[in-house]
Image: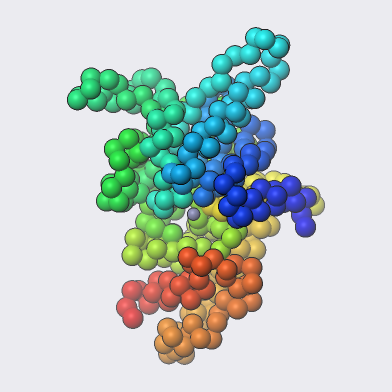
């Protein structure tokens, strides 16, 4: 087992074991992973405050907020003389990589626990007359619309959205640039990955999932082509460290922290399965026949155990994507 990953398997085990406990795992420098809240939560913690990627399940929010506060306090103490610790900094930003509840369920509570930078992005609530100074929530416009559709309460909805391409934070945050990059038609039509440029960390969301085949919600604009394009894009953005573990670290939506080798392996697996389904379709096999032929078989022991996203469902989503939606 690889060095970077051994430490993190502990956290992944906790995340998968659903012990109800939140585990704080250091990624690199001021970057941390919170495991156990539903989806992985990636954090940048430092003098500018906290930038969070994904919110976790709503029932985990209190524990998530307590863990972030603890971390923020510990980081504020670093290098400071005893008894003159500066106060911990609040959560400033929450980015949503996708729309499902394990990524967005905690939006309301976490935004409320945070505090935005005062400035142009403070909205005044006309009814109460108070300024809404909750943490800013960042996502694509499409993800935002889908959250409204799913009846996300107002203060859990994204406050800053972008249509496509890139949303750059307007200033360095904890010493580095942070970008949200839209990955079109991947698990849905509104997915983002979040790139911490100085730390060389990418939060991938569910496009890259160490506990499952990648989820594809065809009804919400997801497609196998988009998932593969996104995996290839992240591969292109990542650097390997020579003969050791390290280089760019990629945080999957679920499971342990990964590097370029892990990402490339996953991308290759998804590509091979796509190619097999495509080949079978060219032989005029029906969806049922293709599912029965088990094009995922080689990896089912590793990735086929998610009861909410079975190999059969994954193959069906690939089939629909390749056949342009027709049966
Ligand atoms: Zn997820």
- Point out the residue furthest to the left here: 127
Which image quarter is the N terminus in? bottom right
**Residue drawn where x is 66% and y is 58% of the image:** 262
Residue 26: x %, y % from top left: 67, 38
> Residue 199 location in percent, x, y?
63, 37
In the displayed structure, does residue 185 sit left or right of residue 204?
A: left
Tell whether 283 sits left or right of 269.
left
Q: How is the image coloured?
A: rainbow
Residue at image point 57% right, 47% down: 20
Residue 180 visible, this orientation? no
Q: Where in the figure is residue 146, as x and y percent of width and height?
A: 31, 51
Please indicate whether residue 76 sits to the left or right of residue 55 in the image: right
Percent of width and height locating residue 14:
64, 50
Q: Residue furthest top?
A: 84
Q: Is residue 180 above or below residue 76?
A: below
Picture residue at 56% right of the left edge, 58% below the top: 209
Residue 204 position (above or below residue 316): above
Q: Quadrant of the C terminus?
A: bottom left
Toward the right, the furthest residue is 243
Q: How many marks?
A: 0
The image quadrant that residue 109 belongs to is: top left
- At x 42%, y 83%, the residue is 287
In the picture shown, does residue 305 fall above or below 167?
Answer: below
Any part of residue 264 in sight: yes
Q: Quadrant of residue 78?
A: top right
């Amino acid at each position: 087992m690889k060095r970077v990953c051994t430490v993190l398997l502990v956290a992944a085990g906790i995340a998968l074991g659903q012990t109800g406990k939140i585990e704080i795992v250091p990624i690199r420098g001021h970057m941390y992973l919170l495991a156990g809240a539903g989806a992985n939560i990636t954090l940048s913690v430092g003098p500018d405050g906290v930038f969070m990627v994904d919110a976790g399940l709503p029932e985990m929010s209190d524990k998530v907020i307590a863990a972030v506060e603890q971390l923020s306090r510990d980081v504020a103490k670093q290098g400071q003389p005893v008894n003159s610790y500066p106060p911990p900094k609040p959560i400033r930003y929450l980015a949503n990589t996708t729309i499902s509840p394990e990524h967005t369920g905690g939006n309301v509570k976490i935004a409320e626990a945070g505090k935005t930078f005062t400035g142009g992005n403070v909205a005044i609530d006309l009814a109460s007359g108070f300024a809404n100074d909750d943490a800013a929530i960042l996502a694509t416009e499409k993800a935002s619309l889908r959250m409204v559709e799913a009846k996300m309460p107002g203060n859990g909805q994204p406050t800053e959205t972008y249509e496509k391409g890139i949303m750059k934070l307007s200033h360095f945050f904890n010493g580095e640039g942070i970008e949200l990059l839209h990955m079109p038609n991947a698990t849905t039509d509104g997915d983002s990955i979040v790139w911490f440029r100085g730390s060389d960390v990418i939060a991938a969301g569910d496009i890259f999932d160490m506990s499952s085949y990648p989820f594809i919600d065809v009804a919400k604009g997801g497609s196998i082509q988009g998932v593969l394009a996104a995996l290839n894009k992240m591969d292109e953005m990542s650097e390997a460290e020579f003969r050791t573990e390290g280089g760019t670290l990629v945080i999957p939506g679920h499971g342990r922290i990964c590097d370029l080798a892990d990402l490339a392996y996953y991308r290759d697996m998804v590509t091979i399965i796509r190619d097999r389904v495509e080949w079978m379709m060219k032989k005029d096999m029906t969806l049922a026949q293709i599912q029965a032929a088990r094009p995922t078989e080689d990896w089912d022991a590793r990735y086929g155990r998610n009861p909410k996203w079975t190999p059969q469902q994954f193959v069906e989503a690939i089939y629909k994507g390749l056949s342009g939606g027709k049966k």
